Amino acid sequence: MNYGAEIHNNNGTLIIGVNSDVTSLIAYDDNLTIAKGASLTVNVPAVRNTDQFVVYTTQLVMQEAPSVTKSTGTVTFTNTSSYFPTSEFQYWVFRKG
């Protein structure tokens, strides 16, 4: 039997599990807010736009999750909601393998 945390994406696909390769947390923030239609770019020097890097978000209140775009050295969060005036969330960036 294995014990530990698992992270799934919004489609239920396992992203990080107890049998995953070594995983490192490389960036996080526990309270970000983005206005409707706005974006926020966070500098994460180690990140690249590959499957080796996973960005996980969770909402602080009942809202839509922001869209996430990875680029070399940055992660951009965009509030694409047409209903909610803000998106309040936490994020973590993991490196797998």
Image (tube, grey):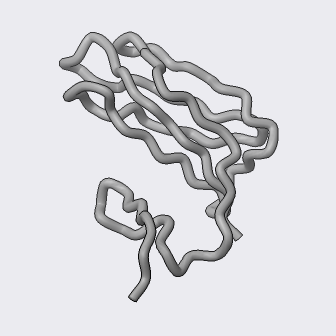
> In the image as oriented, which residue stretches furthest toward the right?
45
Q: How many marks?
A: 0
Give the residue displayed 45% in from the left and 32% down from the top.
90
In the image, is 80 to the left or to the right of 64? Answer: right
Give the residue displayed 39% in from the left and 31% down from the top.
66
Instruction: Residue 47 in the image: state x and y as whole percent.
Output: 73, 46
In the image, is 93 to the left or to the right of 12? Answer: right
In the image, is 27 to the left or to the right of 32? Answer: right
> In the image as oriented, which residue stretches furthest toward the bottom?
1
Instruction: Residue 53 in the image: state x and y as whole percent.
Output: 64, 55
Q: Nearer the viewer, residue 80 or 29?
A: 29
Quarter of the C terminus within the rendering: bottom right
Residue 77 vertical position relative to residue 33 in the rendered view, above or below: below
Instruction: Residue 82 in the image: state x and y as whole percent.
Output: 23, 20
Q: Nearer the viewer, residue 45 or 50?
A: 45
The quarter of the displayed image where residue 46 is located: top right
Residue 97 vertical position relative to residue 81 in the rendered view, above or below: below
Give the residue displayed 32% in from the left and 14% down from the top.
86
Q: Nearer the viewer, residue 81 or 60?
A: 60
Instruction: Residue 10 in the image: state x and y as whole percent.
Output: 31, 54
Residue 22 vertical position relative to residue 8 in the rendered view, above or below: below
Quarter of the N terminus within the rendering: bottom left
In the image, is 40 to the left or to the right of 45? Answer: left
